[in-house]
Image (tube, grey):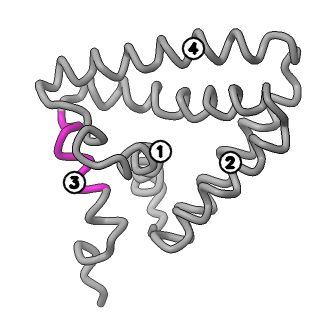
Amino acid sequence: MEDRTTRPIDQLITTYGESHQHPVNEIIHFICVPTIVFTVLGLIWTLHPLGALGMALASMLYYVPLSVPMAIGSAIMMAAMLLILALMPQQLIGQVSILVFVLAWIGQFIGHKIEGKKPSFFDDLRFLMVGPVFVMSFLFRRFHIRY
């Protein structure tokens, strides 16, 4: 049986989780992290929709070596986000993305103020990519999906 704590994905999620213990901070992150992913895709979409698709695909290059199930989950999430962007009034995407991006980051920093710990990415920028799979790991565990 594999020791899950030795896998890089488990180490990253555990380390990220150390600064996300407070229940209010966790809830804020469950809302704000996917929102930030959506707004980043939205901002790139305003430059060119294929750029947003490229960004989603490029992120898979990071996730696949860590965990194929997490990469698949991330791909499904980002595909849904890209579909929403395609259905939105195109002239609103940029303005909405900027506003919501700023509000979501304010929420993140409020969560860390409540937590009493600085955001993980201050120590390691990789944690900007770990946030989405940290949130997804709760869903995977809830539905007994091994990642």
Q: Residue at x 78, y 43 (%)?
A: 51
Q: Residue at x 44, y 62 (%)?
A: 144
State how far apart marks 1 and 2 are (Cα): 14 Å
Name the side, left or right, on which 131 lies relative to 14: right
Lower sequence index among marks 4 and 3: 3
Few, some or many residues within 10 Å of mark 4 (<14, 14–19, 20+): some
Residues marked 1 and 2 touching at CB (< 8 Å): no
* Amino acid type assigned to the residue bearing label 1 in the image: Pro
State how far apart marks 4 and 1 are (Cα): 17 Å
Residues marked 4 and 3 touching at CB (< 8 Å): no
Give the labeled residue for mark 4: 100
Badge 1 element: helix
Badge 4 element: helix
- The image quadrant that residue 147 belongs to is bottom left
Q: Which mark is residue 55?
A: 2
Q: Which mark is residue 38?
A: none
Name the side, left or right, on which 89 lies relative to 69: right
Magenta-drawn segment: 13-21
Q: Where 35 sits versus 14, above or below?
A: above
State how far apart marks 3 and 1 are (Cα): 14 Å
Residue farthest along the left direction in this orientation: 116
State how far apart marks 4 and 3 are (Cα): 27 Å
Residue farthest along the front direction in this orientation: 47
Lower sequence index among marks 4 and 1: 4
